[in-house]
Every structure is written in C-alpha cells, then in structure tokens.
Amino acid sequence: MAQKLVHEVVIVGGGTGGIATAASMLKRRPALDLAIIEPAETHSYQPGWTMVGGGIFDASVTRRPMASVMPRRAHWIRQAAASFQPDENQVTLSDGTTVAYGLLIVASGIRLAWEKIAGLEQTLGSNGVTSNYRYDLAPYTWQLVRNLRSGRAIFSQPPMPIKCAGAPQKAMYLSCDAWRERGVLDAIDVEFRTAGNALFGVKEYVPALEEYVERYGIALKLEQNLVAVDGPGRTATFSTASGEETVDFDLLHVVPPQVAPQFVADSPLANPESGFVDVDKFTLRHVRYPNVFAIGDAGSTPNAKTAAAARKQAPIVAVNALAALDGAAPVANYDGYGSCPLTVERGKIVLAEFGYDGKLLPSFPKWLIDGTRPRKLSWLLKSEVLPWVYWNGMLKGHEWLVKPEIKANA
Ligand code: FAD
C-alpha cells in the first residue's frame, strides 16, 4: 500500500527559491514541521554558469551537494512530486506516496524545453553547439570560444518567458571580448538572433548594450526563432517574418524555449494560459487556494525570472505563508524586483535592476553604481559578492537588503 506522509508545510523544489524560503520560515519559526520535496542530489548556483561559459569560473564552484544546503530542521523527501491534489491538501510523489500539508509552497522552477528545437538534443555538446543553460555544457562554451579563430558564431534567444532574459547576450558579449582580446574578432561574424523585438525589455539599459553591439560588430537580427539544428551539417534554421532561413555556423550558442513543468501545468494550480502556478503578483498567494504559494520561476507573476527575484520573494512568501498558517491575511507585498547583471566585457557589467512595468529599482545610489552604464563595481558584485551572498546569506535565511516591509495594518 502507498505510504502517506503529513507535514505542516511542504515545499516542492529545493532550488534557489525553495531553500531560501525554507530557511527564512525556519529562522522565524524554528519548531515548524517543514518538508522539502526534491529529487536532485546537487544544488546549482545557475547565475554562475555565464561566468563558466566566459572562462571566469570553474564549473565546480557553481554546484554543491543538496545535503549541504538543506536547512538543518527541514525534512528532505528525496523524490519528485508527480501531481497536486489541492482540494485534498495533498501532493503525490513519483512512487505513489502522498504527502498531506497544511500549507504548500511550489518552487519547482521552469522547464528547459530542448526538444522543441528539432535536432538539437542529439548534437548539444558537439559540432560547435552549446548552451550555458546546462551545467555540463557551460565549460564546452568556453572551449569553443577559445578554439574559434574565424567563421560565424550565432547566439540565439527564444520567446519569453525565459529565466534570466539577459543570459543569451551575456554569453555573446563575453565571447566577443575574448575574441577581441585574442585579435580574432574581425575574422568572426557574430550574430544575435532573438525572438524578441528589442535588444532588452527595459529601455533604459538598451543604449549601453547597443554600444557593445556596435563595438563588437554584432549583426542584430530581431524576431527570429530557432526551430531546427543540423549539427553534423552545421546549419541552423530560424523562422522569421519572411519565412524560414537556414544559415551555416561554426559556433551556435542556444538558449532553449522554456515552459512550466508539465506536472504543474496539468494541475488545478496552473494558470490557464501560461501553465505556471496561478498566484497574486503582489502577495504570491494562489488566487484560488489560500494555503498555496509559489516562489521563483514556478510562479505566474510577470517579473523577470531570476535568482535575484527569488531572493526578494523568499522572505515575502515566508511571512505571508506564516500569516496564512495562523489564519491571517498576507502581510507583505512583492514589487516585481528582478535583476540581470549584463556582462558586457570581462571586468564590466550593466546592472539591470527593475520591477513590475519596467520600473527601475536600483539597490545602490547612482553615484555609487549607475546601473544603466558599464561599471567595474558591478562586476565585483557579480564575480565576488553575489555568489558569497547566495551560499552564505540567501540560502541560510539572512535577508540582507531584502527584509520584507510589513504592511502598517498587519
Ligand atoms: P531552480 O533554482 O531552478 O530550482 C528548481 C528546483 O525544483 C530544482 O532543484 C529542481 O530539481 C526541483 N524540481 C523540479 N521538478 C521537481 C519535481 N517534480 N519535484 C520536486 N522538485 C522538483 N538569475 C539572476 O538573478 N542573475 C543572473 O545573473 C542569472 N543568470 C543565469 C544564467 C543562466 C545560464 C541560468 C540558467 C539562469 C540564470 N539566472 C540568473 C536565473 C536563476 O538561476 C533562476 O531564476 C533561479 O534559479 C530560479 O529559482 P527557482 O527556485 O525558481 O528554480
């Protein structure tokens, strides 16, 4: 007979948002009976993969054993969630075990849909086809960049939503900078082919990025969607407004289309259009099930899907979820904050920080860091400070710069 487990709080997913929220909740209420459902044995700092692809970090520094980041008081259920039954306050695991909860937090991230590009999966990691979106492939990006001396390098970006919308460009600028440094950039035709209709979604950051597009001699091609790759033949096919176009490449950096995980999209928790967990964009509470919340990429909120967003959301979900357990209304609101440090060259970053409706939300005064311009201090933040803050602050429930503002009447 299938096993039945019961926990006061159940978090599905032990990635960035899941661990940070668990740590914040347990810090506030150490005796809480909290379980995390997570099948992976390792936990990744994905923002570091851009730096791996740029030859700055070794891949191993971006990954740690899951056991080392699990909060000490959390119960770790080492399995995948397979389905949700929110009307019975229950999650079913892949082996049929059911886990009943008083409160559920969905933190299962976004799914990389590699299979949506024909021929891609067979050739990833060979024939010059790579992606910083996978731990094992980011080092291959750097290997390709180091070895390329001439030819065509294409960097693709799929339609939104994707996690870290700036990451496709970051890979390109760091590659161009390495080629410039080695004196081969003039012999390489670099193309940025994006499904979007602008270089970046928030207009204040576009001028600085355009300067780099110009400096590196990048051909910017908008409204292009990668649909097929022939690895051995070294061709990539894009669908464009004027039909399909097939082009040769020597290096192809692919960012995969991204969708809600199927078990989320198939569940009663899903937003009918996007398939992500249907939550209120301010309180992060489910719009139909008051004892369900979402954090990070899994949620339907229209913010930039980033670890920075999860860093801001985690304490808000923590206080609102604890309030819900006590039968009270949500006590804090999320402003849509997300951040995307655009690595425009080795040593300089354009630090995009913004919230809902593209409102700029800089963490630092302009005289210290002007986020709309390339800055050395922003590089220091990305290369030294943020990884440290991630492992030692965010995952441990320290809410530096992201303490939730509790509403006056709460
Ligand atoms: P994840 O951290 O992806 O965690 C999801 C977890 O859910 C995983 O541990 C997974 O194993 C688990 N899971 C999945 N399915 C199930 C299931 N069925 N049952 C149980 N558990 C499950 N963000 C920034 O802020 N700045 C950056 O510079 C930046 N750069 C990036 C560069 C790259 C190349 C990539 C790939 C991402 C980058 N990001 C960046 C984005 C950031 O990493 C994500 O937005 C963040 O990790 C989201 O956190 P999450 O908890 O929602 O999802």
Image: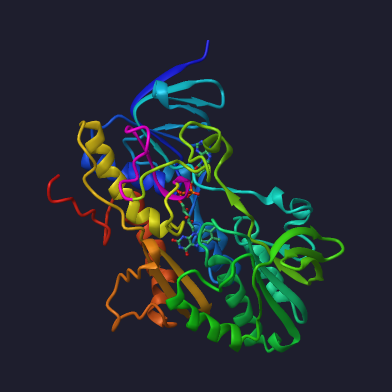
Please say whether residue 379 is visible from this viewpoint: no
Is the magenta region chiefly helix, strand or loop? loop
Given the current orientation, which residue lies at the most extreme right position?
233
Instruction: Name the residue located 59 percent from the left edge and 55 percent from the top edge.
Output: 135
Colour scheme: rainbow
Given the current orientation, which residue lies at the most extreme front position?
242
Q: In which quarter of the image is residue 380?
A: bottom left
Instruction: Name the residue located 52 percent from the left edge and 78 percent from the top edge.
Output: 344
Rendered view: 134 above or below 251: above
Residue 284 point in image, percent of width and height: 34, 45
Rendered view: 334 above or below 140: above
Residue 362 point in image, percent of width and height: 32, 71
**Residue 182 relative to residue 248: left or right:** left
**Residue 397 relative to residue 157: left or right:** left
Given the current orientation, which residue lies at the most extreme left position?
409
In the image, residue 285 lies in the stretch drawn in magenta:
yes
Toward the viewer: 37 or 240? 240
Instruction: Name the residue located 71 percent from the left edge and 48 percent from the top edge.
Output: 115
**Residue 176 relative to residue 89: left or right:** right
Rendered view: 37 above or below 183: above
Toward the viewer: 164 or 184? 164
Find the magenta span and give its range.
282-299
Please say whether residue 208 is visible from this viewpoint: yes
**Residue 30 relative to residue 69: left or right:** left
Residue 319 point in image, percent of width and height: 24, 44
The quadrant the C terminus occupies is top left
Question: How many numbered dots are placed on residues in this image?
Answer: 0
Q: Quadrant of residue 173?
A: bottom right
Residue 178 point in image, percent of width and height: 62, 80
In the image, residue 66 lies in the stretch drawn in magenta:
no
